[in-house]
Image (cartoon, grey):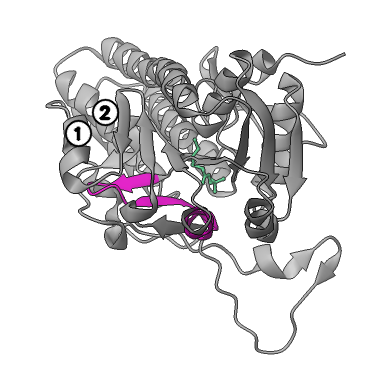
Amino acid sequence: MMVSPDVIKPIEWFHGRVRYLDQTLLPAKVEYRETEDESVLASEIKRLAIRAAPLIGIAAAYGVALAINKVEKDDPAQRKFAFERAYTLFAATRPTAVNLFWALERMRRVFRANEQEPLDKLKHNLLAEARSIHEEDRKMCEQIGLHGAELLPTAAAVLTHCNTGRLATGGIGTALGIIATAWEQKKLKHVYIDETRPLLQGSRLTTWELSMYGIPATLVVDSAAGFLMQRGLVNAVIVGADRIAANGDVANKIGTYGLAVLAKHHQIPFYVAAPTSTIDFDVASGALIPIEQRASSELFQFFDQSFPGGDIEVYNPAFDITPNALVTAIITEKGVIERPTAESMSSLRSHSELSKRAGQAEVST
Ligand code: MRU
């Protein structure tokens, strides 16, 4: 019997605790864990048990709520200490996805607005803000799905990278949300899933999600993308984003840039799907986006073998930058920006835009 994808709940607030799915164990094991300790939650983000741009923003917001919940005495200094400590803790988890800093800034705004309120009210309002961030992301995914599905040709054969679905967001997903919506609208013929080296978000997570929908899909090694395009098997590429600069340059999972170059060569549209919380108007271009470097062990351990030996160094950036010139369109909940430039992107800027500048620090994990 096919399981409905609705059962996927990567994170939720559960009786004063955060309940989350440990994504490192998927697809072999579906294991939910619970914690009321914000430090545990921050470690889980670092080790990718909770991962992907929108989801880590949601998790950090709940993490701040957990930290404030532990404050017992209604003392301004204690409240401030707990808040700032939690903010710094989560800001230091992963540097690239700006949704994390966006969510933390939203929590900070609520903290400041409630500075004179009793402790119980502060706790209540911070949790309410975290829940709103979660719920808003669910709604943004729906809109992205609808806008993106409109752009796809009938009998679309889509190539996607990494995991951008229910496991990555508060809703149906971004790139994968478009795929799910196009499937519902009977516009989708096939999906090709990049395995996504080195942590296999494609072969472990996206395959798991798509098989729940019953969407016909084929898993390929990352390096097969060019060959698929050359054979005419793909008529659109859709990926997510971790941070989009003000000019439309896109930071996303390592390998994305290569896909964009290949798509351009083969004249295949290259779409980036992301909520506006992923856009960083404080960063003028992709060159300024901090790129997370991850541990060398991710590359030289495979099954029970370790390699290489000797003095070989490992370079393991988790993300790369795709220049705006290679992007056919950025699909957001507010609409579609074709051929993004600094000028066209500025139409997505809202007056309530929060600075995401806290995201500039380099973190190595
Ligand atoms: O290292 P990860 O698994 O957190 O990387 C995730 C991605 O690169 C996703 O494509 C991105 O966060 C968008 S998810 C909607």
Whether the residues at callouts 2 and 1 have beta carbons within 8 Å, the answer is yes
* In-front residue for pair 46/353: 353
Rounded to the nearest angstrom, the CA distance separating label 2 from label 1 is 8 Å
First along the sequence among labels 2 and 1: 2
Q: In this view, does 208 lie above or below 328?
A: above
Taking the spot 31% from the left edge, 25% from the top edge, the residue there is: 335
Does the magenta-highlighted stretch encompass residue 247? yes
Q: What residue type is labelled 2?
A: Arg
Q: Is mark 1 on a helix, strand or loop?
A: loop
Q: In which quarter of the image is residue 143?
A: top left
Q: Which amino acid does label 1 sit on?
A: Leu
Does the magenta-highlighted stretch encompass residue 299? no
Residue 177, visible in the rendered structure: yes
Compared across the picture, whether 308 is left or right of 157 comes to right
Taking the spot 33% from the left edge, 18% from the top edge, the residue there is: 129
Q: Is residue 102 above or below residue 226?
A: above
* In-front residue for pair 294/184: 184
Q: Is residue 158 above or below residue 149?
A: below
Q: Where is residue 43 in the image (x, y as percent from the top left)?
A: 54, 45
Q: What span is in magenta? A: 243-263
Q: Is mark 2 on a helix, strand or loop?
A: helix
Q: Label 1 neighbourhood size at 10 Å, few (<14), some (14-19), many (20+)?
A: some
- The residue wearing badge 1 is 354
Q: Which mark is residue 106?
A: 2
Quadrant where the N terminus is found in the figure: top right
Taking the spot 42% from the left edge, 24% from the top edge, the residue there is: 144
Q: Label 2 neighbourhood size at 10 Å, few (<14), some (14-19), many (20+)?
A: some
Q: Position of residue 205 (x, y in %)?
A: 69, 37
